[in-house]
Image (cartoon, helix red, strand yellow):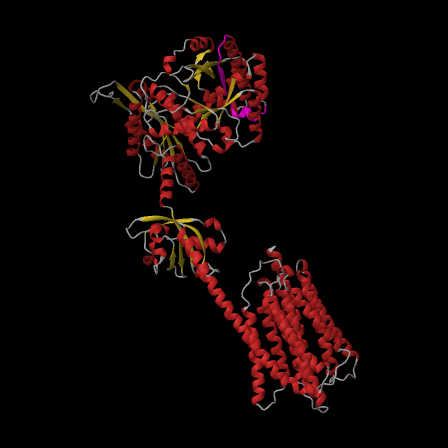
Amino acid sequence: MAERRTRRAAAGAQVLLAVLAVLAVLAVVSTVAQLTAAPASAWLVPAALGLASATAAVVLLRCATRLPGRSGRPWRALAGAGALLALGQAIALARPGRDLSSGGVEDLPVLLAVPVAVSAAVLLLPPRTARRIGTRVLFDGLVVTVAVALAGCVLIGDLVVRTPGLVSAGYPLVGAVLCGIGLVTLTAVPEARRRAAGWLLVCFVAMALVALAGALGRASTGTASSGAASPVWGVVTVLAWLAMLGAGLRGALADVGAHEVPDRRALPLRGGVLAHGAAAAALLAVIGGAVAGRPVTTGEAVAAAVLVVLTSARTLSWAVDAAALTRRLERTEGWFRALVHSGDAVTVVLDAAGRVTSASGPVADRLGRAEEDLLGCLLVGLLHPEDRDLLDRVSAALRDGTPDGLPATGRLGTTEGTWRDVEVSGAAPAAGRRADDGLVLHLRDVTERRAGHRELERLAYTDSLTGLPNRARFMSALDDALAGAARGRRSCVLLVDLDGFKAVNDVAGHDAGDRLLCEVADSLRAEARSGDLVARLGGDEFALVVDAGPDEALALAERLVTRLDRTHRYAAPGDPEGAGPVLRTSASVGVADVVAGADASATVREADLALRTVKAQGKNGVRASGEALVEESARRSRLARDLPGAIARGRLRLVFQPVAGTAERRILGVEALVRWDHPVHGPVSPEEFIGLAEDDGLIVPLQRWVLETATAEHARLVAGGRDLKLGVNISVRHLQARCLVEDVTRALERSGLPARMLMVEVTESVLMDDDERLLAELAELSALGCVVSLDDFGKGYSSLAYLARLPVQVLKMDRGFVSGIDTDPRGAALVGSVVDLGRTLGMDVVAEGVETPGQMAVLTALGCSFLQGWLIGRPVPAGELAAVVDGFDPARLEVPVPVAVP
């Protein structure tokens, strides 16, 4: 759109230049012909004026077509006036023996052009519903009309008396009316069209000059002897005529239409200035004539008196307007100050140099400085050195029209030498136009809020036990390292896993395990360099992002293995230092190079493959990803090749882990877990072969087997009179296959198990797959009667917004929540919030990974009613499950001593 307007403006400018050139040539030719009294001037002048008028009419019509809607009507009317002017000159050419002093039929089209031109001014005004001309504007128009009429009487009054007639008397009055109407139009139109109205006023002034000069020329022709008439008035008439046409064309090209720019009304100052100027000129003409000895007629005296009265009334209206505006400004300023002082924001006004010229609001309370201390100071000088670009950012946002640059925050120094976090919540140019002329800023003290954000950010990126960065911070640092790799910077990832940590927990207790993790964290900090990042990923797994190449990274890994290979004695509470069993721990380290073009998850997977290779080869060592990939690739290929046969031939097996209710004091349900004992590689972890099944498209047949086998086994258990729920883990890939409902229905029908006894457990990664079809699939399962459970809740994908949309009845907290809650108040508070969330949403909450009485006591105190873990029962085959359920001792759920939540 902008390009189209630019092209139209350029084309219009070219047309205007061409027409102006034609008008200039005609002006020169006509002037020369009249000044030299050439015989051809009698037909050359009307021919030139007719040609110019016709050309202008055609161009005006073309300009009107480019304007949208009804915006072109004024210029079509003005084109009609030009056509009438051309018609008059054509008639004049047809009457070679015409009497110039009295005029003739050729003057009728010229006079008709006047009301047509007036209609152009009326059409340029806003629609009647939006038109607000006002008495001031009418005053200005009346003043100009009387002033021009008075000036015309002074200039040509004597000639009009000597040569009465329509031309001599009517033309000056026409000129006066045109000037008044043009001024009213200029003042009343919206700001967007005021430039076009200004050119229209110039056109009308030139038309008035044509009328006056024409009247003077014809009067002088009628009173002078043949050959003695002066050609000056004829030249003035021609030049004013051509100027009239040029101004009309310029106005048409300057018009942007009635809808392009919103109307921004202003006080009619221009009209008042022009009216007073016209009145002063007319009165000076009367006074000058009287001083020169010219008698002042009664009509001129009355007109001069009327002009003085009108001008005085207009001046009085200005005074009234100024007084009313002053009162309004004072009232508005009072409201503004009351509003500013009642809020919590401080309004600061800066001049073009950035100095504070005004400050309003609770300055001392919010900015830590008295108002008088701010006045006259450069605001940039009070900002923290790192935030000195604050004003530049605000100015750029205003200049570019990008409000996304606000709010902007910086640190402002106080008189006590401290720093306040100050937010620029709003800004505007002080002069209302450009930010470079000064700024008005709305400042808020956000120190407490920013401190809270920094603390939340620290908690979000910090491991609460060791104080190291957590997984989220590690992944962010790894992304930065990958970006650096694209620029040629070398870096590596180290994954560190403790060997023997489980024995420390089992033998010496979790307190000893926590102490060991803190000692390992200190050792990693000591060995790492200043530019390296050390993080705890969870449990006994740590990671480093090393700002170096593979050689230095491997050397660091060797030092870590040497330092962490040691023995420990952790005394029980009350025992002397050095007592307790001897426990040996070591570390396995996997190293991966950060390669440009890779992603963070692939890089971590490379390092994890190297780490698992170390574990498989005896632990307490270092491997780089290149060495691990060969062995891991061979293992993965073998497992991927054997998995389809294991599924088809039933070489997988199921074990069942019980879930207990603290209120019911019994086993309420079991979770079916799939296991694979490979003939070569031995037990394969579910995480490994389920991942293979998902990657190789085997997850649906695998889970069909699990569903059919688990429901059949559970139906036999329920047939013995046991009221137990069966939980079966379902992969998101199975949901995405759009056959889960069919598979569940078939398994229930074959086994005879009621749908209400089956709990479908999906991981919370389904929350991130914003697919309405998946949600519909889960809703259909819920409508079938199955219980839908969200497994591993809080492991990394949780989103409350998505959680509220899922038909979920059960939340299963990830075991990472439970680990250490008996010693970690923050962990306990987090578990309590999840329990409260489940209660609020009407969901049961199951805690997984319950292994110690201390954990169970805290969970019970927090209101978690459902527990699963080795403390409740280990996974057992189906044949042993009945004995486990029937022989469950409720005393396991007892908390002998009231436990205070840490």
Q: Quadrant of residue 100?
A: bottom right
Q: Position of residue 18 (x, y in %)?
A: 66, 69
Q: Is residue 89 left or right of residue 339?
A: right
Left or right: where 107 falls relative to 533: right
Q: Nearer the viewer, residue 359 or 742?
A: 359
Q: Is residue 707 left or right of residue 517?
A: right
The image shows residue 729, relative to residue 239, as above or below, that is above
Number of numbered discs visible in the structure rendering: 0
Q: Is residue 392 visible from the viewing direction of this image?
A: no
Residue 324 colored magenta?
Answer: no
Q: At 53% across and 23% down in the image, what residue appears? A: 696
Q: Residue at x 41, y 9 (%)?
A: 887
Q: Magenta residues?
A: 720-738
Image quarter in which the C terminus is found:
top left
Q: Is residue 8 visible?
A: yes
Give the camera-side residue of 631 and 673.
Answer: 673
Which part of the image, by quadrant, shows the N terminus? bottom right
In the rendered image, residue 747, in percent from the top left (x then y), is placed at 57, 15
The quarter of the displayed image where residue 310 is located: bottom right
Viewer-nearest residue: 525 or 868: 868
Residue 411, relative to residue 225: is it above or below? above
Name the spot of residue 353 as percent of width and height, x first: 39, 61
Q: Position of residue 434 (x, y in %)?
A: 47, 60
Please say whether residue 722 is one of the residues in the magenta stretch.
yes
**Figure check: 29 above or below 8:** below
Q: Residue at x 48, y 56 (%)?
A: 399
